[in-house]
């Protein structure tokens, strides 16, 4: 097995696990947003917050589906791998920016830190394997 094949397997595994994690949490949020909000935040959410959480869940479900499609291909398409990584980084930057400009206080963002850590780890793995994959392809060519 070549190094490039191992990188492909790692990418497929990361994408599949992310699709499972993000897809399941998004579906739960779409179906029972109050329960998910109460479990995540620890308090009852307002109607506006529930609507936004469902919009977020829809976007997260679409990311999960892109990751799932990429995971089912022997060599995940680079464009899809990078699309998932960029989407995760954009979401993390948005939360960081909201905290930095005090739109939302850091205390209010605290319940989301676990989600951010998982998303950050997935993004880091996808970026690292994407860069490694590009380097290996240049060496082969």
Image (cartoon, rainbow, N blue to C red):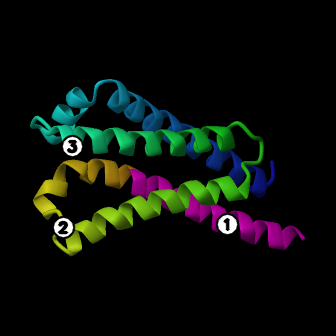
Residue underneath mark 1:
132
Q: Quadrant of residue 28?
A: top left
> Which is closer to the viewer, label 3 or label 2?
3
Report the residue at 25% width, 53% height from top: 113
- Mark 2–mark 1 Cα distance, whole angstroms, equals 37 Å
Q: Which residue is mark 2?
A: 103
Residue 87, image x, y percentages: 50, 58
Q: How many marks?
A: 3
Residue 74 in percent (x, y) is at: 77, 41
**Residue 73 picture location, percent across and down:** 75, 40
Q: Find out whether residue 140 is within the magenta segment.
A: yes
Q: Quadrant of residue 121?
A: bottom left
Q: Which residue is mark 3?
A: 48
**Range covered by the magenta-colored residues:** 119-141
Question: In this rendering, is residue 38 above or below 7?
Answer: above
Q: Earlier in the sequence, mark 2 or mark 1?
A: 2
């Amino acid at each position: 097995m070549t190094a490039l094949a191992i990188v492909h397997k790692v990418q497929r595994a990361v994408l599949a696990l992310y699709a499972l994690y993000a897809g399941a949490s998004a579906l739960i949020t779409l179906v029972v947003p109050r329960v998910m909000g109460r479990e995540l935040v620890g308090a009852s959410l307002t109607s506006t917050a529930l609507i936004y959480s469902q919009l977020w869940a829809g976007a997260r479900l679409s990311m999960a589906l892109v990751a799932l499609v990429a995971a089912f291909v022997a060599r995940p398409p680079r464009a899809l791998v990078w699309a998932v990584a960029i989407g995760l980084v954009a979401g993390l930057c948005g939360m960081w920016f909201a905290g930095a400009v005090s739109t939302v206080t850091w205390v209010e963002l605290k319940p989301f830190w676990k989600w951010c850590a998982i998303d950050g780890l997935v993004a880091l793995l996808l970026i690292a394997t994407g860069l490694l994959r590009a380097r290996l392809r240049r060496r082969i060519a």
